[in-house]
Amino acid sequence: MNYILKKEDFPKFLELLKKKFGKVIVPAKNETGATCFQSYSGQELFLESRTDFSAKEFFRPAKEKMFSFKKKSSSFEVKSEHDNTKKVLFGIRPCGTHALSTLDELFIKFLGEDNFYSDKRKNTIIIALQCNEACENGFCTSMGTSQASGHDLLFIERGHDFFVRAETKQGTDLLDPTLFKHTSDAEPSSKIECKNELDIEGLGENLYANFNHSVWKEESERCLSCTSCTQSCPTCYCYTSNDEFVFGSGTESERFRVLDSCQLQRFTKVSGNHVFRPSREGRLRQFVLHKFSYYKKYHGMHLCVGCGRCITACPVKISLVDIANKIQKHPLEFQKHSLEAKK
Amino acid sequence: MITPEKPLLAEIISISQDTSDTKTFEVGFVDKKLQKKFSFMPGQFMMISVFGFGEFPISISSSPYKTNSIKFTIVNVGNVTNAMHKLKKGEQIGLRGPFGTGFPLQKFRKKNILFVSGGCGLAPLRSAIYAVQEKKSEFGKISVLFGCKTPENVLFNEDMNQWQKENFNVLSTVDYPNKNWKGNTGVVTGLFKQVNFSPENTIVMICGPSVMIHFSLIELRKKGFRNEQMFASLERLMQCGVGYCSHCNIGNKYSCIDGPVFNAKDLEKLPVKEN
Amino acid sequence: MSVKKVKVGFFSLTCCEGCEFAVFDLEEKLLKAFDYLEIVESRVLMEKIKPEAVRLDISFVEGSVISKHDLDKLHYIRKKTDFLVALGACAAIAGINGIRNALPEGVQERMKQKAIIPVKEKAFSLSAFVKVDYILNGCSVNELEFLDFLNRVLHGVIPRLEEVPVCFECKLNGNACLLLKGIPCLGPVTYAGCDALCPGQNAQCIGCRGFTKDANFKSLDNLLKEMGIGKKERFNLFTYFNPLPKELRDLRGGSE
């Protein structure tokens, strides 16, 4: 069913949601000028394009408490955290909805539900916002992620209105009849053309076969290992778990999942200070191969939704699209440069 | 709803000091029903939580036929293992697992077995050796090769004596001998010439530092062993154990779910020494 | 937790004593820690110190070594300490005192001659003379990092210095990248732990927490150059707190 919301009524809609759920997450600018998702409190929204930082903070937070441990004489009490806060996420772009489906594949479908992720996922109503224009470095058309999926409502900007497509019952329930009117209009076309193009034909296998391609070294030479790519990425989920003592208690401690980055040496450091992936070349390759090769092998889809955030965020303009395309266009002959030949 | 990372409580039943920096902990789940249901394959690992300090992966070093309790042989190498070493009998830890692949012993029936271990790499192999010892009649000739730095680092002396009594060919070597050392000196690959059965019909299981695994495979291939006959257990930083966190990613495999025991054929294709 | 209190001392060599103040800024939080530790020596905190031959479990030493007096004091502290922590940039990387190390040699010589007290040819970090067990970097130190360190050490955990750049924390906080805005920033080559305090306020990182071992100086210098930052400015930025990295030797002297 389709509806129309007048843009002038849009703030009223957000206020209604806030009243009903307490927490509404919207795209906006923060004080440093970066665009990200934050709790709505009447601030000006950023609706021009996708945000610099993704919405993953609300599903895979940078630091997430998993368990608390309490010592009672000689035994311990282990308590698992649950997050049952209901919230509405407004303004996630089609690529963002695909990023969530990609993470669902690992944290919901792979082993069964990982409660830390699925709690948040289930308790969040998703209102996607269609893109009318391609963004700066995006390549969603290549990745097949330019149309939203798995959302509850889809908003499409149309002149002075939002054209709203309801997908689920919990989405439809949000549509207050005083603000939303039925429409029989045809859905506005929302076909976008990305400038960036990535050839994904056989990409995963091809990249892995080109493990020793010279492009890794060439591109990584200017890499600063600043982790901007992995942190702005909506699907980079790799984490480290840490225990911390509650300060001053002596008997209580907590275990956290902390977002980590494959671009850091510590990511593969074991006790005795041995680092398994010390070189910048290897770390950059890990980032790209995990996205296109490894995740695909295990979960049947790319760990990349073509949002282009990693390209925009990189201070030295390393682009995974360029790397992948270079290899796709000029792969090393398999025989000469495969791993077997290296030995 | 599952929490694959939730540690289950276990209690330390006994502790034995193996060497100056290595202890073997015997533990059992606090929930007796859980312990009763527990089974594992030699080569599999578990995650031990020392609450407040963190978690570490460790292979099981006890027999898969004796699951009233579980034994772990732990070297004191970092903050968490150091905290573990300070624990006493009766104290509680957290356990998750078992995780990963083990040595597929049931496929090795009727074959000769060669165990090659370096340092604390003997611990995960001990589980497999116990298993073979238990069903001795089902296997051919058994050899256990062990190498470590100094005579003080030699692990499981009692077990080695026992294996010798069982007519296993037990050979050990050290890098730096002292006056009392009567065994071999040099690297473990140097012991291969003392093993006198042919490559055919023999299975090799290796565990130790990655350099040792690397050279053992090279030497054994020279002796005519094929990749299909050789299995090695790799050390990586396993952290979640279930394929979530990506720390142990090596090439297109995860050592927590595809390993830690790999066939040499797979190992050959993996960028084990990723620059 | 055991009742036996950890004996702690705070010492200052040549510096502004600001790091010690930063630590005492923790107020109640630090008072809570007094259940587990006993401060044996601290010029800032104690009215009167009787220098005793008491052994210290942990010493926090701030300031650089610029004179023989500093050096003697440092050796004295090291001798009676089990775990010595370099507190702040001056102690860890010579910091502000080290600015003179980057000056032309003639100027350095003149400064040495004109100094009121006899000084060494350069300003040194503690690790130039003694074993330093841990480094708490920054100008001034981050008090929360200090607290976290105390929390770990009191439980018997020895923290490890991780090769993590300021950018990591900067991005975790969702800050806009200064380099992308055209502002020179040393975030990519500087140790994290400050919660990206400066970049979060739109101020460039000047490297007060020291350079990481994993730093890619060449690439950052190239980037700054492309942004139109002159050679002299780049030299000054890189040597503000730190010795000039080997990779950037070419920045010394002369103009572009």
Image (spheres, rainbow, N blue to C red):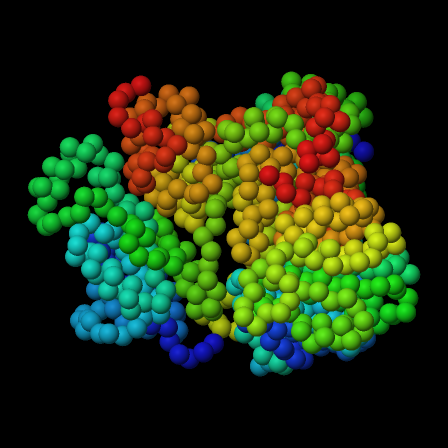
> Taking A114 as reference, is A304 above or below it?
above
Q: Considering only vertical position in the picture, is B211 above or below B29?
A: above
In this rendering, the answer to whether B113 lies above or below A182 is below
Residue B256: percent from left, percent from top:
71, 53
Position of residue B172 measured from the top left corner of the image (x, y, whole percent): 67, 64
- Residue C115 seen in the current view: yes
Spot occupied by residue A244 in the image (x, y as percentages of width and height): 52, 62
Quarter of the image with the C terminus of chain C in it = top left
Residue shown at 26% from the left, 64% from the top: C77
Residue B44, picture quadrant = bottom right
**Closer to us: C32 or A121:** C32
Q: Quadrant of residue C110?
A: top left
Between residue B233 and residue A148, name the one nearer to us.
B233
Residue A279 lies left or right of residue B170; in this view the side is left
Asked whether A99 or B71 is in front, the reply is B71
Where residue C242 sits: x, y (%)?
32, 40
In-image side of A26 versus C10 (left or right): right
Q: Residue at x 76, y 45 (%)?
A: B221
Q: Nearer the viewer, residue A147 or C85?
A: C85
Question: Where A113 falls versus A318 (above or below)?
Answer: below
Residue drawn at 68 percent across, 62 percent down: B146
Q: Residue at x 31, y 61 (%)?
A: C60
Mark count: 0
Q: Is residue A172 visible?
A: no
